[in-house]
Each structure stands twice: as C-alpha cells, then as structure tokens.
Image (tube, rainbow, N blue to C red):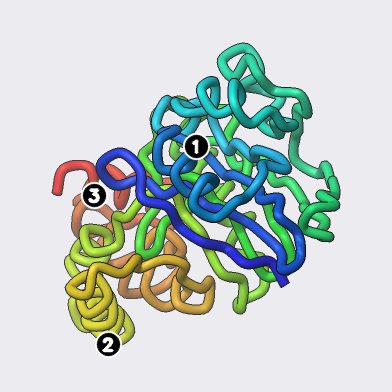
C-alpha cells in the first residue's frame, strides 16, 4: 500500500507525497512550491526517491529547481513538455510503465491532453494522480488543447475502475460542485457531496482524494451522456446537442463564465 499525503502549496495547490512504510524515501508529485516540501522532509526525516510531474505549468513545477539543489533525485514527466520542464531525467508518454523501488509499485502513464498538450496522468494500483485534468466535481480549463481532446482524455480516465481514488492538483471541489448543481439541481448525489465536502472544508481538511465512483454520479464533465446533462447543455447552447465533445465544450464554456 502506498501512503499518500497532501501538502498545501501556493493558494490552492496540493503537492502529493507518496511513501511506503519501512522506507525513508518519498516521491514528490508536482512540487509547485519548494518550502512546504522542504519543511516536510526536514520534520519527517525523509529523503526524495523521485519526482513525478504531470505538466509544465509553474504552479506544478515552480519548486523543482530549488528542491533538486538540496534533494537530487530522478524526475519523471511528460516527454512532450521536455522543452519546458528542463530537469526531466525520465521523459514519459502514454502507454509507458515504470516501477519505483522506494514504493515497490508500478505506474502506468496516460496521455491526457487538453489542459496542456503534453499533460500526463499516473496510475498506481487504485490511485490516480490526475494533475489538472480531472478534479473532484470538475476538470481543468482547456488552455492549450481543444475541447475534443479534453473530452477524449476524460473518457480515458472514465474507463478506469470505479474504486480508483483521484488525487488532483487543486482544492477546487466546492466551486466545482456549485457548478455541478447548476447543471443538475435535482441530482441527490451532488447535494450529498456538497454537504460532505462542506463539512471537510469547515474542519480545514482536504476534500481530496475523491473516487471515480462518485465522479460518475456527480461530475458533469464525466456525465456528457446522461439525459439531464445533455438537456442542460442543449438549453445553454440554444440547440439540441448530441456529440459528446460539443456537450463537453458547452459545459466547459459555461463553467468558465460562471
């Protein structure tokens, strides 16, 4: 079993720390800021076994150079973004598999373009490191790719087992679920999720990870084939929509404007 802990960074980012009992090495996922990671390593007496990077945005790699200065370790990340993540030692693309002995775990890599063109996600058994592609209740903005690419990326992740836990890059869940209620105001699963997440955040606890099982019931960006979501997107567009990419694009533009 991998032990996964969140470190808060910047305004609303999470740096995920992966470890295994009996090993003092940890794996750092998307270190957007160095200071919280440095504090954790010092306080817990840990060493860095590897860094995993999902995409090139500064809030996901901004702390990498400083950390490597004091805690050198292999850096895994998207081959397609090697020009902007210049400290990569292990460039990866969808379909690749690799093992980290400090975790005694194999990872599978998925290409999930949309938020950025080279964005990747990492799957360990039962655990998905989704970066800024899939959030609890939402998804990332489409900055570099197209809506069709992002919808296809989410379809790839939607095909994973329902009990997969999702570790996203940001604490966006309350805002995401507020939008989900706009799309499906009568969806009781969303109403229940809002109450559960509100309780967590009121107690200053992370809302993550979530599960794909919950996302199937609550996340409009994974529910493009559900009648209520199709109807809401069609009303928003002012015409009947049937194509999943068009439904997704309408939802994403709606969320951007909300």
Q: Taking 214 as reference, is 183 above or below it?
A: above
Residue density around tag 1, few if under 14, some if 14–19, many if 20 or more, within 10 Å:
many
Left or right of 81? Residue 38 is: left
Residue at the image point whose x is 29% and y is 55% from the top: 172
Q: Taking 160 as reference, is 54 above or below it?
A: above
Image mark for residue 31: 1
Q: Taking 45 as reference, is 114 above or below it?
A: above
Instruction: Tell me where residue 204 sits by quadrant.
Output: bottom left
- Cα separation between marks 1 and 3: 27 Å
Give the secondary structure at mark 1: loop
User: Percent x, y for residue 142?
Assistant: 40, 35
User: Percent x, y for residue 13?
Assistant: 36, 45
User: Closer to the N terminus: mark 2 or mark 3?
Assistant: 2
Report the residue marked by disc 3: 255
Number of numbered callouts drawn: 3
- Cα separation between marks 2 and 3: 20 Å
Left or right of 250? Residue 69 is: right
User: Closer to the N terminus: mark 2 or mark 1?
Assistant: 1
Residue density around tag 2, few if under 14, some if 14–19, many if 20 or more, within 10 Å:
few
Residue at the image point whose x is 39% and y is 44% from the top: 140
């Amino acid at each position: 079993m991998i032990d996964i802990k969140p470190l808060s960074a910047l305004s609303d980012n999470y740096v995920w720390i992966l470890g295994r009992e009996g090993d003092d090495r940890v794996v750092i996922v998307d270190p957007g800021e160095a200071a919280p990671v440095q504090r954790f390593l010092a306080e817990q007496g840990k060493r860095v076994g590897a860094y995993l990077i999902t995409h090139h945005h500064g809030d996901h790699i901004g702390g990498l150079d400083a950390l490597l200065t004091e805690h050198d370790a292999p850096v895994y990340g998207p081959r397609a973004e090697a020009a902007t993540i210049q400290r990569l030692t292990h460039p990866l693309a969808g379909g690749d598999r690799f093992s980290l002995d400090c975790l005694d775990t194999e990872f599978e890599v998925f290409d999930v373009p949309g938020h950025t063109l080279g964005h990747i996600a990492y799957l360990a058994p039962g655990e998905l490191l989704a970066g800024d592609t899939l959030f609890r209740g939402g998804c990332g903005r489409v900055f570099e790719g197209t809506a069709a690419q992002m919808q296809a990326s989410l379809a790839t992740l939607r095909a994973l087992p329902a009990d997969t836990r999702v570790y996203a890059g940001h604490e966006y869940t309350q805002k995401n679920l507020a939008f989900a209620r706009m799309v499906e105001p009568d969806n009781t699963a969303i109403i229940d999720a809002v109450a559960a997440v509100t309780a967590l955040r009121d107690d200053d606890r992370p809302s993550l990870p979530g599960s794909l099982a919950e996302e199937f019931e609550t996340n409009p960006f994974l529910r493009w084939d559900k009648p209520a979501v199709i109807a809401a997107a069609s009303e928003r567009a002012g015409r009947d929509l049937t194509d999943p990419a068009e439904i997704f694009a309408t939802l994403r533009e709606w969320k951007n404007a909300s």
